[in-house]
Image (spheres, rainbow, N blue to C red):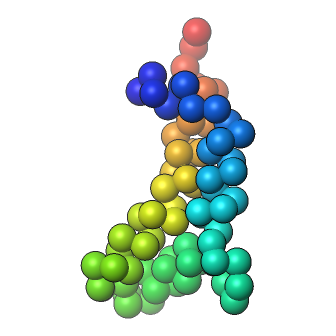
Amino acid sequence: MKWLDKLPWFMIIVFAVTIGLAPFAPEPHVIEKLKMLSAGNLARPIDIFDLLMHSSPWILIVLKSIRQFSVKR
């Protein structure tokens, strides 16, 4: 997981704001897809891919945070 350590915070945050929240109106895709997931309507492969694509920057933020703040150096 050294590749995760090498990723700069700035780049991950920019990805989260742009890709993670795109499109900005009427609501971000990740919110729409999470609503579909909670309602049980997330069945089409394109919707699953869309959820994974738009949530990947947020997952990277969580993983990098866990790794940075829990690993003793």
Placement of 63 over or under 26, stated as above or below: above
Residue 16 x %, y %: 63, 56
Q: Can residue 16 be seen at all in this image of the molecule? A: yes
Which residue of the protein is positioned furthest toward the top in this rendering? 73
The residue shown at (63%, 27%) is 69
The quarter in which the C terminus is drawn is top right
Residue 62 found in image quarter = top right
Residue 19 x %, y %: 59, 63
Return the residue nearer the eye: 23 or 35: 23
Residue 53 found in image quarter = bottom left
Residue 54 x %, y %: 51, 65
User: How many labels, in total?
Assistant: 0
The residue shown at (36%, 70%) is 49
The quarter in which the N terminus is drawn is top left
Residue 29 x %, y %: 56, 78
Residue 45 found in image quarter = bottom left
Q: Can residue 38 be seen at all in this image of the molecule? A: no
Return the residue nearer the eye: 30 or 22: 22
The residue shown at (55%, 20%) is 71
Placement of 1 over or under 55, stated as above or below: above
Left or right, 43 with respect to 33, comes to left
The residue shown at (51%, 62%) is 55
